[in-house]
């Protein structure tokens, strides 16, 4: 028996130039904030950008974007709706406000299903908000999407960085490209994370100072893009965009 | 037209297998459809027919329905999925992403959402028959 979905995933992504999976070892480091803001920042630089929320059990990008009343269009699969200029896909279109208690195998199935039916069209970037850790979603995306690259998010905390180090090691062993590491929620600037990241030969994309304004800007994209946080993410977007001609 | 995407996968998988097995013609493609996904057979048949390649121009598409059997991981209860009592929105959510069953369905005995789909989840290419090159 053959799973027909696996055959078409590559085709669904054929028009996407670069896939960036925003990932971390632990939760709570600001992945969703960075993924969403990075997607918006790239879009505002004139790129065609998609945002995929793959954190099925704890989706959050819709809260950051303030998405309401959108639904994918059905046309030989599904076409993600446009939210603030982004082609946007999230499990909340189907789970709405309900909790989605999914085991690993179910997460895998849902990822395969969504990747097989979502027609992204032509995009310069597809930014993916990954669930934390190196479990099913990470392994599936590496298996299913050749050409994927990762952006790892850490905080200055040794607890967070220790888990990111393992993520980076796994990616290196699997020869998956890493565009770099972002140090988020910095309160007391230090070069410790930077030197460790550079020590393992991975680009350090920058430190983002903890910005209390962000919480107030959730759901209000214009306000969000005016924060110091978004300014810092914008610099990272500019740096990353130099990698695409 | 989510069926269209699945049909595309079936056609493309059948083509790859036929190439691997050096078939010059595919005569029959059997597709197994799990009831959980509530695939519209007519639309799937239409989509398969529309996407036929020359390699399968005379192929017969056989669609087999597999009842969806669910088993609770907490109390062991087994039951059969029935879409009848679900509203349209819930039905559609499960249609697009069958794992949404864990969002909307509960074990009829103990109320847990922690159940497994023992069989009848998605769409599978069960077998293809054909004529070998030079045969």
Image (tube, rainbow, N blue to C red):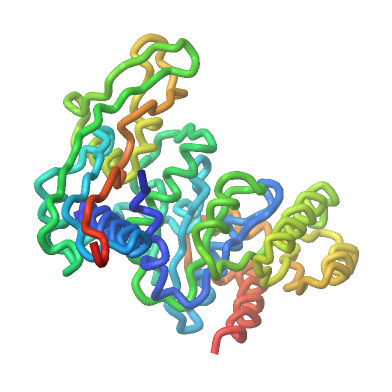
Query: Along the horizontal axis of the image, is A64 left or right of B93?
Result: right
Q: Measuring 23% from the left and 44% from the top, which residue is drawn there?
A: B31
Question: Can residue A7 be seen here?
Answer: yes
Given the current orientation, which residue lies at the most extreme front position? Answer: B135
> Looking at this view, is A124 or A9 the one in front?
A9
Query: Along the horizontal axis of the image, is A35 left or right of A90?
Result: right
Q: Position of residue B97 (x, y in %)?
A: 34, 43
Q: Position of residue A165 (x, y in %)?
A: 79, 56
Given the current orientation, which residue lies at the most extreme bottom position? Answer: A245
> Looking at this view, is A244 or A184 the one in front?
A244
Judge whether B126 appears above or below A29 on screen. above
Q: Position of residue A8 (x, y in %)?
A: 36, 61
Q: Measuring 65% from the left and 82% from the top, which residue is drawn there?
A: A239
Q: Quadrant of residue A150?
A: bottom right
**Total number of numbered discs in the rendering:** 0
Q: Measuring 12% from the left and 64% from the top, which residue is drawn there?
A: B57
Q: Measuring 36% from the left and 37% from the top, which residue is drawn there?
A: B100
Q: Quadrant of residue A104?
A: top right
Judge whether B20 appears above or below A17 on screen. above
Query: Along the horizontal axis of the image, is B27 left or right of A120?
Result: left
Q: Position of residue B109 (x, y in %)?
A: 37, 9
Query: Along the horizontal axis of the image, is A202 left or right of B122?
Result: right
> Looking at this view, is B88 or B107 the one in front?
B107
Which image quadrant: the C terminus of chain B?
A: bottom left
Judge whether A181 appears above or below A133 on screen. below
Which image quadrant: the N terminus of chain B?
A: bottom left
Question: Can residue A79 be seen here?
Answer: no
> Looking at this view, is A164 or A220 the one in front?
A164
Judge whether A91 appears above or below B16 on screen. above
């Amino acid at each position: 028996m053959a799973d027909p979905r696996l055959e078409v995933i590559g085709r669904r992504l054929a028009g996407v130039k670069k896939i960036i999976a925003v990932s971390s070892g632990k939760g709570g480091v600001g992945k969703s904030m960075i993924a969403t803001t990075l997607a918006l920042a790239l879009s505002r630089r004139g790129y065609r950008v998609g945002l995929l929320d793959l954190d099925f059990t704890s989706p959050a990008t819709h809260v950051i974007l303030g998405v309401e009343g959108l639904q994918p269009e059905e046309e030989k699969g599904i076409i993600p709706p446009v939210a603030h200029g982004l082609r946007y896909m999230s499990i909340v279109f189907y789970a709405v406000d309900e909790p989605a208690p999914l085991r690993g195998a179910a997460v895998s199935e849902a990822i395969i299903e969504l990747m097989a039916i979502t027609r992204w069209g032509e995009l310069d970037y597809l930014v993916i908000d990954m669930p934390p850790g190196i479990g099913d979603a990470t392994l599936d995306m590496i298996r299913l999407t050749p050409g994927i690259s990762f952006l790892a998010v850490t905080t200055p905390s040794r607890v967070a960085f220790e888990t990111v180090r393992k993520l980076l090691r796994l990616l290196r062993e699997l020869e998956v490209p890493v565009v770099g590491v972002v140090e988020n929620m910095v309160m007391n600037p230090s070069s410790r994370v930077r030197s460790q990241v550079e020590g393992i030969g991975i680009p350090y994309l920058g430190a983002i100072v903890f910005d209390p304004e962000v919480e107030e800007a959730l759901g209000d994209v214009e306000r969000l893009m005016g924060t110091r946080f978004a300014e810092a993410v914008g610099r990272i977007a500019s740096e990353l965009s130099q990698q695409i001609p | 037209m989510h069926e269209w995407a699945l049909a595309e996968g079936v056609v493309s998988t059948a083509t790859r297998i036929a190439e691997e097995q050096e078939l010059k013609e595919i005569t029959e493609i059997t597709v197994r459809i799990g009831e959980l996904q509530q695939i519209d057979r007519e639309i799937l048949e239409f989509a398969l027919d529309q996407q036929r390649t020359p390699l399968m121009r005379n192929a017969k598409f056989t669609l087999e329905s597999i009842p969806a059997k669910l088993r609770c991981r907490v109390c062991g209860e087994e039951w059969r999925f029935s879409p009848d009592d679900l509203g349209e929105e819930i039905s559609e959510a499960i249609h697009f992403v069958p794992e949404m069953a864990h969002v909307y369905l509960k074990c009829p005995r103990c109320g847990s959402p922690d159940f497994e789909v023992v069989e009848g989840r998605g769409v599978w290419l069960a077998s293809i028959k054909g004529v070998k090159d030079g045969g």
